Image (cartoon, rainbow, N blue to C red):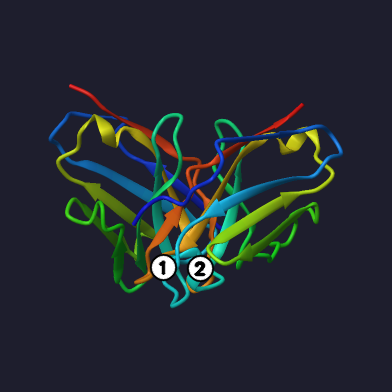
Amino acid sequence: QLQLQESGPGLVKPSETLSLTCIVSGGSIRSDTYYGAWIRQPPGKGLEWIGTISYSGTTYYNPSLKSRVTISVDTSKNQFYLKLTSVTPADTAVYYCAKDGHPAPWFDPWGQGTLVTVSP
Amino acid sequence: QSALTQPASVSGSPGQSITISCTGSSSDVGSHNLVSWYQQHPGKAPKVIIDEVSERPSGVSDRFSGSKSGNTASLTISGLQAEDEASYYCCSYAGMHTWVFGGGTKVTVL
């Protein structure tokens, strides 16, 4: 059973870079069917798709975040990563990683999520 | 890329049916059948309950159903139960392998 878990700092200072890791277990992401996604949710607000990466490293980003986002993958470690630069308090959110069902239109399963707060 | 429009809240009594709308545009909801719905209980990760407009993943109750007309997708919950009290989000493909979510709807069981 595929499981995902996010890890990374819970507090980041404004203007710095947010870095998170998604650890995938119960299956290999070294597959031509594997796509991983990052999705975030500010406290009390809705979901926002950040981006998706394929097993081969092809990336797709939300146009509104594209200039600040980098998603990468390490198939040897069964992990994929999120970097968001120049963060502000508006980037405070629970960050989720999930399997992107590409080409099917769903995200499943999801990690439990990790709260990242941007504050001095 | 603008968020899809959902009502902020919908309520119903146990046993009733409710419908949640999700309005987009001809660039997303209206252009294909790549719409999914997610249920999220407080403090938990979302869970997919409908994909490709009306398909239920294995294990999802048949009380949940989806449909679409033009630029608006809809989720109907039949036989409302206390456990259905949660937030619901729609999500649509928006072209160039990008995705857009709705703002979410909080369902209250009276």
Kindly give the residue lying farthest to the front in the view shown. B70
Q: Give SS at disc 1.
A: loop
Residue drawn at (50%, 41%) of the image: A112
Q: Are marks 1 and 2 on the same chain?
A: yes
Residue drawn at (44%, 44%) of the image: A47
Position of B59 with respect to A28 (left or right) is: right
A88 and B65: which is toward the camera: B65
- Residue A37 point in image, percent of width and height: 40, 57
What is the number of the mark on residue B27? 1
Q: Above or below — where is B19 with respect to B105?
A: below
Residue drawn at (73%, 62%) of the image: B58
Q: Above or below — where is A43 with respect to B16?
A: above
Q: Residues within 10 Å of mark 2 (few under 14, many from 20)?
A: many
Residue at mark 1: chain: B
Q: Are marks 1 and 2 in contact (CB under 8 Å)?
A: yes
Q: Give SS at disc 2.
A: helix
Can residue A72 be seen here?
A: yes
What is the number of the mark on residue B30? 2
B46 and B24: which is toward the camera: B24
Kindly give the residue lying farthest to the top in the view shown. A120
Total tally of numbered discs in the picture: 2
Amino acid type shown at disc 2: Gly
A33 and B109: which is toward the camera: B109
- Residue B35 point in image, percent of width and height: 55, 63
Position of B26 with respect to A88 (left or right) is: right
Amino acid type shown at disc 1: Ser
